[in-house]
Image (spheres, rainbow, N blue to C red):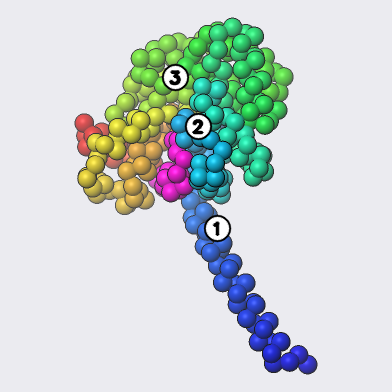
Amino acid sequence: MPSRRRVLSALALSAASLALAQPIRLARAADAATVLQSRPIPSTGELLPVIGMGSSGSFDVGASPAERDPLREVLRRFFAAGASLIDTAPGYGRAEAVIGELLAETNLRQKAFLATKIGAVGREAGLAQFRRSLELLKTDKVELLQVHSLQDWKTQIALIGELKAQGKTRYTGVTHWQDSGHDELAEVVRAVRPDFLQVNYSVISRSAEAKVFPLARELGVAVLVNRAFDDGRLFSRVKDKALPGWAAEAGIDSWAQAFLRFALSHPAVTAVIPATGKPDRQSDNLKAGSGPTLTEAQRQSLIELLA
């Protein structure tokens, strides 16, 4: 028979183990509380979570723990919620290298839907840039390869087609980030019919609704939305303003969620890619990926509120 002291010691150890495990369980429960919706990529039917992540600015950091630790947590929360799409580019400073290093050290590459871009003039320059991107991202292929802001698009979309045939990317895409580029973007999409297009869209920048979105639906092209916060201008417009009365009913408890849900409520949109380097903002953004689609009345309410 075990001694009373040994029994009490065992009980104490068990209690301590349960106490240590409790925060882990609570963290996992919080991660699981955000169940992201997914939408099909029209060209294949593959499901893509509606909240992705950009990296411009947010992942252009150094190697110090103070700079990297928040990004590790940003990625942890992102993947724990079931998200996968990370969008980057050679033009985003050190972002590709930082993403590659963090995914490698956390062994999370297999969970990522990596999207990068070619922003170069000439085939050889484009190919060299892509090879460098693979090196920095520490991978042998990406899921989506896009022409950055339509730069030398005829040359680069042909190159991306070749790389797709070689298995270096699964999807082709073209991007733009300004209203002034939407007419050309629409022309290019009609000419080459990529798998994806990426475009700016927000409550106060709705130019994409005129040509780009209808064309994407007509041709079966997936749409990624960048600048859904309009580079932060939306937040300055609602400073000190309360959320609309219908927000709670829609499961929205922050302005970030409202703005992302606005973008996602357009039927042409496949996913939004807000950029952040802050874990709490990542969690907030991810919450926008669940709940009902905004009604037309709710969308109009936001438009009028920010007019």
Does residue 149 lie above or below 99 as drawn?
Answer: above
Vertical side of 148 occupied by 275: above or below: below
Q: Is residue 115 shown left or right of residue 230?
A: right
- Residue extent of the magenta highlight: 274-292
Which residue corresponds to mark 1?
Answer: 28
Q: Residue 281: give x, y in percent of width and height.
A: 42, 45
Tell me where residue 226 appears, x and y as whole percent. 43, 29
Name the residue rendered at 31%, 52% in the picture.
248
Does residue 285 belong to the magenta stretch? yes
Residue 13 at x, y = what percent?
65, 77
Q: Residues within 10 Å of mark 2 (few under 14, many from 20)?
A: some
At mark 1, the secondary structure is helix
Disc 3 designates what residue? 176
- Residue 263 picture quarter: top left
Say whether residue 224 is visible.
yes
Nearer the viewer's eye, disc 2 or disc 3?
2
Label 2: element kind = loop
Which residue is rendered at x = 66% and y = 39% of the image? 104
Residue that carries the numbered disc 2 in the rendered image: 60
Q: Earlier in the sequence, mark 2 or mark 3?
A: 2
Q: Amino acid at mark 1?
A: Arg
Across and down, in percent, residue 119 comes to 53, 16
* Circle 3 crowding by C-alpha within 10 Å: few under 14, some 14–19, many from 20: many
User: What is the spatial separation of the Cα atoms under label 2 and label 1, in whole angstroms?
Assistant: 28 Å
Viewer can see residue 173? no
Residue 46 vertical position relative to residue 220 in the rendered view, above or below: below
